[in-house]
Amino acid sequence: HYVLNDEDPVSVENRGTLPIGNITGIVAFDFDVRNQELVVGDSQSLVIARYKLDGSEYKVIADGDMAMGPDGVALDWTTRNVFWTLAAARPEDRRIEVANHEGTARRTIVSDGTYITRD
């Protein structure tokens, strides 16, 4: 289970638990309103995945060749593409990738390390 708003005293009344497993290190997420899914970047498992909010489905969108792990994730609700940034120790190894919602058609769209990560 993943608890939302655990430390936020302002929204204690909105606290909830999502019945989803396999999450060990979420560093970024986006919400898919149409499919009631959470799209996550997991820096421990080194995957981009999506979870049905009711816990009924888990799908890895991308794994492998994740360097130091995902750094950010975004869902384009019009094209259904998932974009993510990958962290790396050397700035020139940082990149931005995209795949469709099902995890196919994965490709790198920026690979010269020109974007800035959280660090």
Image (tube, rainbow, N blue to C red):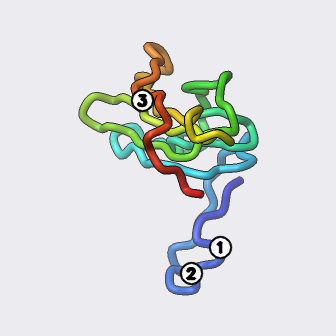
Q: Nearer the viewer, residue 15 or 72?
A: 72
Q: Nearer the viewer, residue 68 or 34?
A: 68
Name the spot of residue 75 as percent of width and height, x first.
Answer: 38, 39
Instruction: Name the side, left or right, on which 79 lies relative to 67.
Output: left
**Residue wearing tag 1:** 6
Mark 1 residue element: loop
Please tell me which of labels 2 and 3 falls first in the chain.
Answer: 2
CA–CA distance in space, label 1 to label 2: 8 Å
Residue 43: name its quadrant: top right
Are the residues flagged by discs 2 and 3 in contact, CB closer than 8 Å? no
Residue name at image x 32 percent, y 37 percent: 76
Residue name at image x 64 percent, y 77 percent: 7
**Residue wearing tag 3:** 110
Asked if residue 26 is positioned above or below residue 59 in the image, the reply reads: below
Q: Name the kind of residue labelled 2 in the image.
A: Val
Name the spot of residue 105 as percent of width and height, x first.
Answer: 43, 13
**Which mark's residue is nearer the viewer, 3 or 1?**
3
Q: Name the kind of residue labelled 1 in the image.
A: Asp
Please tell me which of labels 1 and 2 falls first in the chain.
Answer: 1
**Which mark's residue is nearer the viewer, 2 or 3?**
3
CA–CA distance in space, label 3 to label 1: 35 Å
Are the residues flagged by discs 1 and 2 in contact, CB closer than 8 Å? no
